[in-house]
Image (cartoon, grey):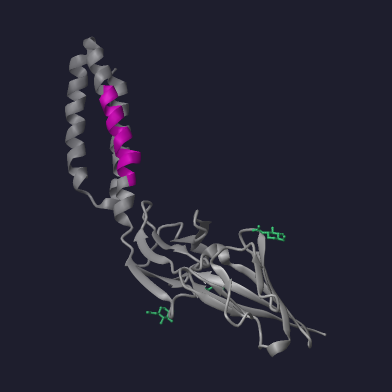
Amino acid sequence: MIFCISGVSVSVCAGYSTVLKCGNDPGDSLLMITWKVDLLYNSHCILASEIEENKTHSNCSKRLSFKQDNLSLRIDDSKIIDEGNYTCEFVSDKGTFINVITLNVLVQPLVTLEINRFGFPECKALRGNPAANISWMPTAEHLTTTNRNMEPDNTWTVISTYGRERVNVTEVTCVVFHPTFAHPQNKSITTNTTAPLDTNIIWCVAVPIVSIIIIIIVLCMWKQSHLRTCFNMENRNTATIQPQGNNEEDREEVEPYASYTEKVNTIYCTM
Ligand SMILES: *[C@@H]1O[C@H](CO)[C@@H](O)[C@H](O)[C@H]1NC(C)=O
Ligand SMILES: *[C@@H]1O[C@H](CO)[C@@H](O)[C@H](O)[C@H]1NC(C)=O
Ligand SMILES: *[C@@H]1O[C@H](CO)[C@@H](O)[C@H](O)[C@H]1NC(C)=O
């Protein structure tokens, strides 16, 4: 007769010891017990104990051993690579008993929330096992992108970014779910989206304009015959640029283009 149980799941925190119990002790009638281990990230290995001869065989890690009662398997210093299905099988004069236990090895992730270099809130759950789940408040499923990557040590890093467009809420909260957290971890951040975008404006608008102005000045100086005309135009244009520098941030984006076009036209007209 075969008795079969499965679906039992055991969790242990990485670095700790755990004991997987095969089943109730059948007493003196136990003849042999075998643990077949199917590892998630590896091959498989077998531990076997012949009770009467008091012999054990194993090609598993040395951290796996039979407990005193011969029915339970002890795992010391658990590692993520120990994750998998542990099938124990014992034979007694009452029949064969099979039990499948799934082992999960947990690693608590480190949670961070910051504004990334593009100006968007970015929530990270670093090096956890299993991968953490990240959600946001206020919810904006269509605006969030989440990526999960496995680290060399088999832990997971999950990165979620809020908003592909400019976010117009003042505060967002990232909520991280993980089996090692008694309660979801919440982190909030105020969204100050203007600062990083201003840096982009400097690189995309101001730098090319300044470069072109320098090229034009060099061209003018090179054209010796028109030298005086050029400097006259230059003075007139710098006078119009000055007050615009003090304008509001959002207008800055448009205004330099306007003054730039104006200036180029006038200079080309005189040349
Ligand atoms: C252990 O032995 C089994 C059966 O001989 C074999 O299939 C398995 O690959 C071995 N595992 C290791 C880790 O050597
Ligand atoms: C994360 O989400 C998946 C799918 O929705 C779910 O199966 C899993 O249990 C969740 N994990 C946690 C830790 O909440
Ligand atoms: C985090 O947010 C969730 C969802 O709103 C809430 O259930 C939980 O109590 C909050 N936890 C803390 C520590 O604020």
Residue 53, given in percent of the width and then of the height, sits at 70, 75
**Who's the residue at 61% across and 59% down the image?**
41
In the rendered view, tell whether residue 208 sits above or below residue 82: above
Pick whichever, 212 or 242, lies toward us.
Answer: 212
When asked about the image quadrant of residue 266, the answer is top left
Give the left or right position of residue 94, taking residue 187 as reference. Answer: right
- Chain part drawn in magenta: 200-216
**Who's the residue at 65% across and 70% down the image?**
56
Count of numbered circles on the image: 0
Residue 154, given in percent of the width and then of the height, sits at 52, 59
- The single residue placed furthest to the top in the displayed view is 225
Give the left or right position of residue 67, taking residue 243 as reference. Answer: right
Magenta-highlighted stretch: main secondary structure? helix
Give the left or right position of residue 75, taking residue 176 as reference. Answer: right
In the rendered view, tell whether residue 32 sits above or below residue 117: below
Pick whichever, 137 or 28, lies toward us.
Answer: 28
Residue 45 in sight from this viewpoint: yes
**Who's the residue at 22% across and 16% down the image?**
221
Q: In which of the image's four quarters is ligand 1 placed? A: bottom right
Give the left or right position of residue 218, taking residue 171 as reference. Answer: left
When asked about the image quadrant of residue 207, the answer is top left
